[in-house]
Amino acid sequence: AETSFESWAKTIPDSLPEFQAVISTVRNWHTEIFNYFDYRYTNGIVECLNNTIKSVERLGRGFSFEVLRAKVLFANAAAKPAKYSYKKPTARTSNTGSFGYATPMIPSAESRKLICGSGVDLFELSELLENNQL
């Protein structure tokens, strides 16, 4: 990509200031632009999230930051439940009652680990905004 860009840049005459501005911008942001060709990451998801938040802000006209933040993070229609992983019971833990019947194992708070916190599925929130359901 870098070789192709440099080859193209050499073909642009100085009499085209618009293209010279593009060349200058690409050279100023050289590392950031050409890293894409090595790692294939973009900030597209961040831009989508920013657009979703701006949509909520436009709909709310005059929301304070705290209200806007709460509306984006805790919108009930787009909320998703928290997910946990549980440790297996140790060998010393018995699950038989006094009559030898198996009793259900109720996981303790210490035995579970939060994998994914609750909050809003931002893609679901985006769809709700587009369909005027929020």
Image (cartoon, rainbow, N blue to C red):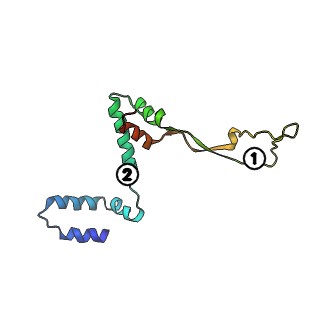
Q: Residue at x 73, y 38 (%)?
A: 106
71 w.r.t. 111: above or below: above
SS for callout 1: loop
Q: Residue at x 70, y 47 (%)?
A: 87
Residue 19: x %, y % from top left = 18, 61
Residue 28: x %, y % from top left = 28, 59
Q: Is residue 27 left or right of residue 123?
A: left
Residue at the far right: name it: 99
In the picture, the quarter occupied by the C terminus is top left
Tell me the distance, in whole angstroms, between the alpha carbons under discs 2 and 1.
Answer: 43 Å
26 w.r.t. 69: above or below: below
SS for callout 2: helix
The numbered dot on residue 112 is none
Location of mark 1 (residue):
89
How many badges with numbers are in the image?
2
Identify the amino acid type marked 1: Pro
Q: Earlier in the sequence, mark 2 or mark 1?
A: 2
36 w.r.t. 94: above or below: below
The numbered dot on residue 44 is 2
Q: Is residue 77 left or right of residue 24?
A: right
